[in-house]
């Protein structure tokens, strides 16, 4: 029985990027049949969207941290 393919949202960011790189490499080879190229292209688009959403979420987390949620430790005033 074939292992089910994880959805892009289920994959860790790094795994999604690796899979996307593999798709690009396979498509650039020019050896895939048209139907397979279209299937991989669609999967690639899904991976890009999921990765972009994760990057946007990470940017939001960084903005929150930069706005003072975490403050530098002030050793001079701590006793």
Image: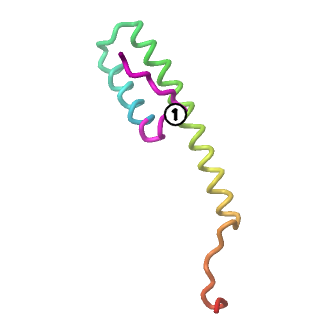
Q: Quadrant of the rendered structure where residue 32 is?
A: top left
> In the rendered image of this protein, does residue 6 appear above or below residue 17?
above
Q: Residue furthest front?
A: 1
Q: Position of residue 12 (x, y in %)?
A: 47, 40
Residue 50 position by quadrant: top right
Indicate yes or no whether the magenta region holds residue 28.
no
Task: Give the colour scheme shown.
Answer: rainbow
**Which residue in the structure is indicated by mark 1?**
10
Residue under the point 62% across and 76% down: 72
Position of residue 67 relative to residue 47, above or below, is below
Whether residue 56 sits left or right of residue 45 in the image: it is: right
Q: Main secondary structure of the magenta part?
A: loop
Q: Residues within 10 Å of mark 1 (few under 14, many from 20)?
A: few
Question: Looking at the rendering, which quadrant does residue 76 occupy?
Answer: bottom right
Residue in the image at 60% along x and 87% along y: 75
x and y percentages locating residue 56 in the rendered image: 62, 43
> Residue 38 in the image: x percent, y percent?
45, 12
Q: Give, as a single range, the part of the protein colored magenta.
A: 1-15
Query: Quadrant where the C terminus lies?
Result: bottom right
Q: Across the whole image, how many numbered discs are drawn on residues? A: 1
Residue 55 higher or lower than 8, as above or below:
below
Q: Secondary structure at mark 1?
A: loop
- Give the left or right position of residue 56, taking residue 12 as reference: right
Residue 73 in the image: state x and y as whole percent. 61, 79
Image quadrant for the N terminus? top left
Q: Residue at x 70, y 67 (%)?
A: 68
């Amino acid at each position: 029985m074939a292992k089910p393919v994880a959805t892009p949202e289920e994959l860790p960011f790094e795994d999604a990027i690796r899979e996307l790189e593999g798709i690009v490499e396979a498509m650039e080879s020019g050896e895939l049949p048209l139907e397979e190229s279209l299937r991989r292209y669609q999967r690639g688009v899904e991976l890009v969207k999921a990765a972009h959403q994760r990057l946007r979420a990470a940017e939001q987390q960084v903005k929150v941290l930069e706005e003072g949620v975490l403050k530098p430790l002030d050793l001079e005033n701590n006793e």
